[in-house]
Image (cartoon, grey):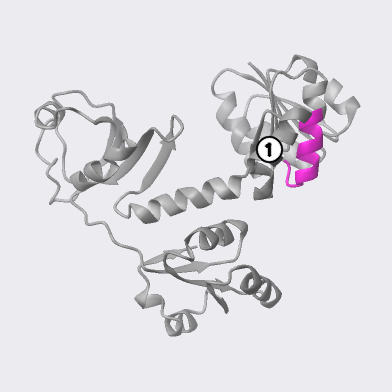
Amino acid sequence: MKIIIAGAGDVGCHLARMLSGDNHEITVIESDRKLLEDVSAVADLLTVEGDCTSFATLRKAIVRKADLFIAVNHEEERNIISAILAKQMGAKKSIARIDHNEYLEPNNKEVFINLGIDYLFYPEKIAARQVIKLLGHTATTEYVDFSNGKLSLVVFRLDPASELVGHTLLSFTEKQQPLSYRTVAITRDGRTIIPHGNDTYMEGDMVYIITKEDSVKEVMAFSGQSNIDINNLMILGGSQIGQRIALELQDKVNIKLVEYIADKAYKLAETLDSTLIINEDGRNIEAMMEEGLSNMDAFVA
């Protein structure tokens, strides 16, 4: 598959590294030569130096033959323009990173589809949702939805109290009929095992399980750890991710958001009317303790 990535920042570099390992033909467009050199050092790919909103640059990248065009610059406008141009110039699919949640509303999203953009994604919203899911399942170290939310991957470490410890995969699953989950990997002593029926669960194992969404709580009980109900939450930093987490949870739990920059703290207070905004340096441990850090059920930074 020929994939063109516009933007060699953190997101673009990560995508290039990840996709180049799957034998795709990757081309990265970037106007900053230093960023192009950096991405070239971590992945096997082609680079085009130039403005991704330029017809000449897109032609140089041979966008007409692209199976997929992904625009992930920091500037939202450049992503939207380049994704529209790429599709009009022959790319089969185009994707644009955005910074405004309103673009994802059904009526607004339809406008972009009509312009030629197949998919919009808002990385800060995706990250915030992942944090919120982890807060809802505190015994996990990872929690990922896929197949449109029908399946979930949960990852947790086995405590001594776990009922899995000492059982083989086969002996335990025989007691769990009908089976609603599958163990797909186990990390033990720094090694990752693809387990089979006769492999035994051991204390300290990091277990990766795929399950149906409605069986997540049942699977989490296997960890041997207690789930913590989050009633008091402190968020360090008023980034877009921090704001999104507060916005989605402020009517459900008590939230304190700590922001060091005064002007930003005032603006956050206007937007997050049910969140207590604290203008303080999060590195000041004494001040954080005075704000009730030790009484928090969870801390997000």
Q: Is residue 18 left or right of residue 197?
A: right
Instruction: Tell me which amino acid carries mark 1.
Output: Lys
User: Residue 12 at x, y = what percent?
Assistant: 66, 37
At 81% from the left edge and 36% from the top edge, which residue is drawn?
Answer: 81
Q: Is residue 34 left or right of residue 191?
A: right
Asked whether 233 or 22 is in front, the reply is 233
Residue 1 on the magenta span? no
> Start and end of the magenta stretch?
73-84
Tell me if residue 180 comes above or below residue 243 in the rendering. above
Residue most toward the front?
A: 107
Element at badge 1? Answer: helix
At 32% from the left edge and 42% from the top edge, which residue is drawn?
Answer: 155
Residue 81 on the magenta span? yes
Q: Residue 174, located in which quarter of the rendered image? A: top left
Q: Residue 293, located in which quarter of the rendered image? A: bottom left
Dominant secondary structure of the magenta stretch? helix
Q: Is residue 231 visible in this depiction of the protein?
A: yes
Q: Is residue 111 left or right of residue 89?
A: left
